[in-house]
Amino acid sequence: MPAAFFGHGTPLNTIAANRYTQAWRAYGAALPRPRAVVVFSAHWYVVGTRITVARKPPTIHDFNARFPQELFDFTYPARGDAALVERIVELVSPVRVERDAASWGIDHGAYSVLAHLFPNADVPVVEVSLDRAQPPERHYELAARLAPLRAEGVFLMGSGNIVHNLELADRTFGSEPFVWAARFDELVRGLLAAGDHAALVSYHRLGPDARLAVPTPDHYLPLLAVIATQRANERADTIVDGFAFGSGSMLSISLAA
């Protein structure tokens, strides 16, 4: 059965060769080829549940002009999957889903990793939005309805970070985490190992470190989308970990039996 994956890349990881991209490439090369990929991305955080339906989803350059032109020239030309869209709509019913043909596509949260997992862009990709009007419990419940897709050959991906606080980021700090960031990352790892989904969904009750690590839900919610599909015999295995700028966890995990 295709795996479920949680992780996130900065825009530069799209074109970089580093220990994160090397780990993703090795992981992707070892995967059985999935029928398609469904992505919950931190960067599609809107009101309502939307799904990309374009036959050729555009590459979204959702970052500012300080990044190199090479990134703006990059495209990830994976096709969409109309049949998969309708299957997702069926599975999450009666949740209302807006079919989005034009306003979104494949954003950097998705392709910065997919460019290494599936570098030929030869696996169809469908993105599902995160609904900013709904609580974490709703995201977990909606994603749980998509668990059958994994048995149908679909790779489920959550693109986000356990710790993501750009306001406190220190670009002179290097790869060492702030103390509070390391504590929260370690706490979440322990809950993942224990399979304590209830505590992970109620992350806002995990103390003051949680308020610093998850100042907004967008980068944390994709983790819930992934663990919602976890089977009883599956572990959350670490693919690669580390920190960026003190306040950004780069942990990537895969659910594996």
Image (cartoon, rainbow, N blue to C red):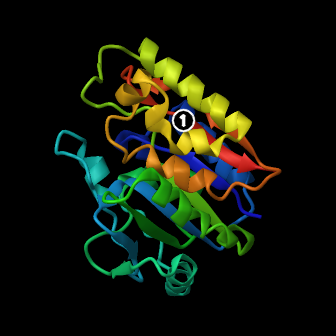
How far across and how far down the image is residue 118, in percent? 58, 59
- Pointer 1 residue: 20
How far across and how far down the image is residue 95, in percent? 45, 77
Q: Which of 44/94 is in front?
A: 94
Taking the image as shown, residue 221 lies to the left or right of residue 188, namely left
How far across and how far down the image is residue 72, in percent? 26, 54
Numbered-mark total:
1
Up-down: is 243 above or below 110? above
**Which residue is the extreme one toward the front?**
205
Quadrant including the N terminus = bottom right
Q: Which of 145/35 is in front?
A: 145
**What residue appears at the point 37 percent right and 53 percent down from the top-left corner?**
108
How far across and how far down the image is residue 234, in percent? 78, 49
Image quarter for residue 157? bottom right
**What residue appears at the point 60 percent right and 63 percent down from the top-left corner?**
144
Amino acid tagged 1: Tyr
**What residue appears at the point 27 percent right and 23 percent down from the top-left corner?**
168
The reply to whether residue 114 is in sight is: no
Up-down: is 183 above or below 81? above
The reply to whether residue 137 is in sight is: yes
**What residue appears at the point 57 percent right and 67 percent down from the top-left corner?**
37
